[in-house]
Image: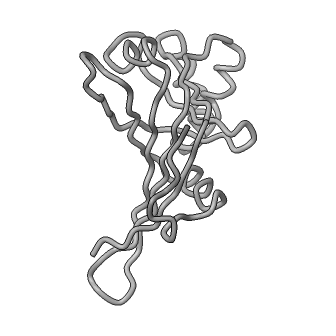
Amino acid sequence: MFRPMRRFKQEVSREECIKILTEEKRAVFAVNGDDGYPYAVPVNFWYDSEADRIYFHCSKAGHKLDAMLKDDRVCFTVYNTGYQKEDWSYYVTSVIVFGRAKVMDNEEEKREKIKRFGMKYYPSEAEVDEEIRKDFSRVNFVEITIEHMTGKLVHEK
């Protein structure tokens, strides 16, 4: 169903993909948008290594949510800042995930996952708890089930 990587010599291991999903803070979430146009938007996210799932929050209305509810097939792209060797160019590793996205409906599980998501971004647990107290009822939390994942190291020269 999913194509093999064409440039397989640049493919990185699953472990490297998981490292990037765990350490990086921003990604691009893409859906099948209106009138067949792709719609891709930057998001903050959290990767749950135990569940092998990706999570992010969104509002209760909007283009992203409408598209996702119409077609749950999504693409999720993360890349690191890279590094330089001897010249001006960078080596950058990216991870592309194909999967299925759904809005979480179990309130207890949603609260637990949002807290873990928040701990990735906020400096203290108290601040995470306060944000959850203020905004929990106004937010959707999305879970992506990973169906296929590849990672690639690119020399940008």
| Residue drawn at point x = 55 percent, y = 55 percent | 23
| Residue drawn at point x = 48 percent, y = 26 percent | 73
- Give the image location of residue 129, x and y in percent: 60, 27
Q: For this view, does 134 lie left or right of residue 146?
A: left
Name the colouring of the figure: one colour
Q: Quadrant of residue 126?
A: top right
- Give the image location of residue 121, x and y in percent: 51, 42
Furthest-right residue in view? 50
Quadrant of image for the N terminus? top right
Q: For this view, does 62 lie left or right of residue 68?
A: left
| Residue drawn at point x = 42 percent, y = 12 percent | 70
Most foreground residue, 2 or 52: 2
- Give the image location of residue 78, x and y in percent: 45, 49
- Give the image location of residue 7, x and y in percent: 45, 64
- Position of residue 20 relative to residue 116, above or below, is below
Number of residue marks: 0
Quadrant of image for the C terminus? bottom left
- Position of residue 156 relative to residue 94, above or below, is below
Most foreground residue, 78 or 33: 33
- Position of residue 132 relative to residue 29, above or below, is above
Q: For this view, does 70 lie left or right of residue 36?
A: right
| Residue drawn at point x = 46 percent, y = 30 percent | 74
Q: Quadrant of residue 123?
A: top right
Q: Quadrant of residue 147?
A: top right
- Position of residue 79 relative to residue 50, above or below, is below
